[in-house]
Image (cartoon, rainbow, N blue to C red):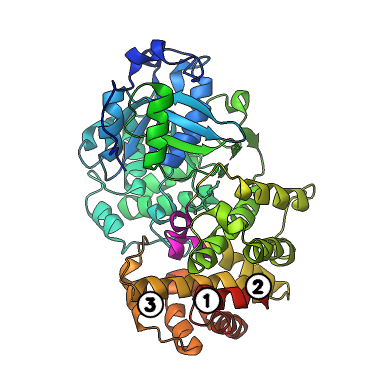
């Protein structure tokens, strides 16, 4: 959200760079002298805290890889950052904190208001890479396939020249490049989805096929969609951060961001056009990233969602506070070791114990106020990739799924509680979920059955008797979802 802090000083801008305090890390290049080589769709805090920082590290050497950030719907970020020449501050949270000003986003466009400019960037041969952080719901998938009934996709299929969805923009750009014989860009998903590149490719091809089968064949043959794994904990901006940044910077920043010191980016080595020399700035380029993305999603994100739902039911506010609750911290640790680790297939040299220990350490970081309610957003999109896929694999291996069902039941109880309190969920399925939640009576069988009708969440697991039974047991164990009953469920 934009700043509510009063403007007591000047605004951060290119002009102010020279007079920033020495403690602030600033771009090692002149932002105005860079050229755009990347279009990024979805300029949220995560992109600005992650990919844009790697590119910021690179621009002194390679000024041809600056970013044009595109927001599909909201003009909020361009309104906040354009008056500051695209600059913004990033507070790095660790034992010591560091403040950095990032200059790699040289242009910000709101697609809804500046469609022609976005399409012309996508057609520009200097743009060799399109990256995306549009969150799980932005892919408009139903299971593994493109959801052609999704309103944005239906709109774009009817008028592909004036798209609304990310998939619609990617294909519109590729279509023009094909027509003009311009080499296509690589399309790199940076979202928390297993096999994100494969899923995006499939959705793009299905969409293109509806418009023009020859275009789909061309994309199939010419365009690369590498998979990637991204990792850095990025709590949402709050007023405390804004105040702190004004104090340390001496300038007002309308939308600073924060993240933990730790960061990781692994990208599959599959490109159809030039790419930034990512290795120079700490990105891992690998031929096989499957395994790494799964590990991150299932351990880190699976544990995060578990803390989010069970912790929120216990009225706990943040991840670090949840980790101070021994029953909850003990449960996520047990969940990772005893339920997630045995079900997952990992690369041979993967050190699972060290990976789990590092995650728990990051969760305990007291300098990060990462709100559980932020992680609880979009549960209907996150649970399938974070926990339900582990449940399916555990069942296939004949392992117990009892522990894994507790966070799923926790989500249902959370939805029920929010609905009964009249609080809307941040979730694309909010209407349906609130309806289901309001109708819950506490009867485990009836309540769980109503949730299982959500086909896009549970798919065939809804017909799996062992899963349904275990889930009903977990839901019943959580009783009425009050802190006392969650505590009781965690004790047994
Ligand atoms: C979190 C992630 O909000 C969430 O759902 O689980 O954003 C998490 O912090 C990142 O994936 C860490 O890399």
Would you say the residues marked 2 and 3 are in contact, meaning their CB atoms lie under 8 Å apart? no
Q: Is residue 194 visible?
A: no
> Dividing the picture into quarters, in which one does residue 454 lie?
bottom left
Residue closer to the observer: 147 or 348: 348
Is tag 2's residue or tag 3's residue first in the polypeptide sequence?
2
Is tag 1's residue or tag 2's residue first in the polypeptide sequence?
2
In the image, the segment drawn in magenta is: 371-383
The picture places residue 209, in percent across and down from the top left corner, at 37, 53
The residue drawn where x is 65% and y is 66% is 327
Side (left or right) of 175 relative to 185: left
Side (left or right) of 388 relative to 441: right
Is tag 1's residue or tag 3's residue first in the polypeptide sequence?
3
Where does the C terminus fall, quadrant-wise?
bottom right
The picture places residue 108, in percent across and down from the top left corner, at 31, 31
Residue tagged 2: 403
Q: Residues within 10 Å of mark 3 (few under 14, many from 20)?
A: many
The label number, if any, that marks residue 437 in the structure image: 3
The residue drawn where x is 49% and y is 77% is 481
Determine whether 351 is above or below 28 in the image. Answer: below
The picture places residue 221, in percent across and down from the top left corner, at 49, 42
The residue drawn where x is 47% and y is 89% is 443
């Amino acid at each position: 959200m934009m700043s509510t802090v009063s403007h007591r000083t000047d605004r951060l801008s290119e002009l102010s760079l020279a007079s920033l305090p020495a403690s602030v890390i600033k771009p090692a290049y002149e932002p105005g002298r860079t050229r755009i080589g990347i279009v990024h769709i979805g300029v949220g805090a995560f992109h600005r805290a992650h990919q844009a920082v790697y590119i910021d590290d690179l621009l002194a050497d390679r000024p041809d890889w600056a970013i044009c950030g595109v927001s599909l719907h909201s003009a909020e970020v361009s309104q906040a950052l354009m008056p500051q020449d695209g600059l913004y501050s990033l507070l790095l949270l660790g034992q010591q904190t560091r403040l950095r000003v990032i200059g790699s986003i040289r242009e910000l466009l709101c697609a809804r208001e500046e469609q022609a400019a976005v399409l012309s960037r996508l057609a520009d041969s200097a743009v060799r890479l399109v990256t995306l952080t549009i969150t799980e719901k932005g892919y408009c998938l139903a299971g593994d396939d493109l959801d052609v009934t999704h309103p944005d996709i239906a709109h774009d299929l009817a008028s592909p020249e004036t798209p609304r969805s990310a998939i619609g923009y990617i294909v519109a750009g590729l279509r023009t490049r094909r027509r003009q014989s311009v080499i296509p860009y690589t399309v790199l998903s940076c979202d928390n989805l297993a096999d994100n590149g494969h899923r995006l490719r499939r959705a793009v091809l299905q969409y293109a096929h509806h418009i023009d089968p020859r275009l789909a064949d061309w994309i199939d043959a010419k365009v690369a969609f590498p998979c990637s794994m991204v990792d850095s904990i990025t709590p949402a901006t709050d007023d405390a951060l804004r105040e702190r940044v004004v104090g340390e910077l001496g300038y007002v920043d309308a939308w600073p961001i924060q993240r933990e010191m730790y960061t990781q980016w692994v990208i599959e080595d599959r490109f159809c056009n030039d790419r930034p020399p990512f290795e120079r700035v700490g990105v891992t380029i690998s031929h096989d990233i499957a395994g790494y993305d799964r590990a991150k999603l299932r351990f880190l994100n699976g544990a995060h969602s578990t803390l989010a739902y069970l912790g929120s039911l216990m009225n706990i506010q943040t991840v670090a506070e949840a980790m101070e609750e021994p029953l909850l911290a003990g449960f996520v640790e047990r969940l990772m070791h005893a339920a997630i680790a045995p079900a997952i297939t990992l690369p041979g040299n993967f050190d699972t114990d060290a990976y789990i220990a590092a995650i728990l350490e990051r969760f305990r970081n007291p300098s990060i106020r990462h709100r559980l309610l932020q992680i609880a957003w979009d549960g209907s999109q996150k649970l399938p990739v974070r926990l339900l896929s582990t449940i399916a694999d555990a069942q296939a291996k004949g392992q117990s799924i009892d522990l894994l069902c507790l966070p799923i039941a926790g989500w249902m109880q959370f939805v029920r509680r929010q609905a009964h309190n009249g609080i809307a969920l941040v979730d694309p399925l909010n209407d349906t979920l609130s309806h289901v939640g309001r109708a819950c009576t506490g009867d485990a069988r009836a309540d769980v059955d109503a949730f299982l009708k959500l086909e896009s969440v549970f798919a065939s697991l809804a017909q799996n008797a062992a899963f349904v039974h275990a889930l009903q047991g977990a839901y019943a164990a959580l009783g009425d979802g009050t802190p006392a009953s969650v505590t009781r469920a965690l004790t047994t």
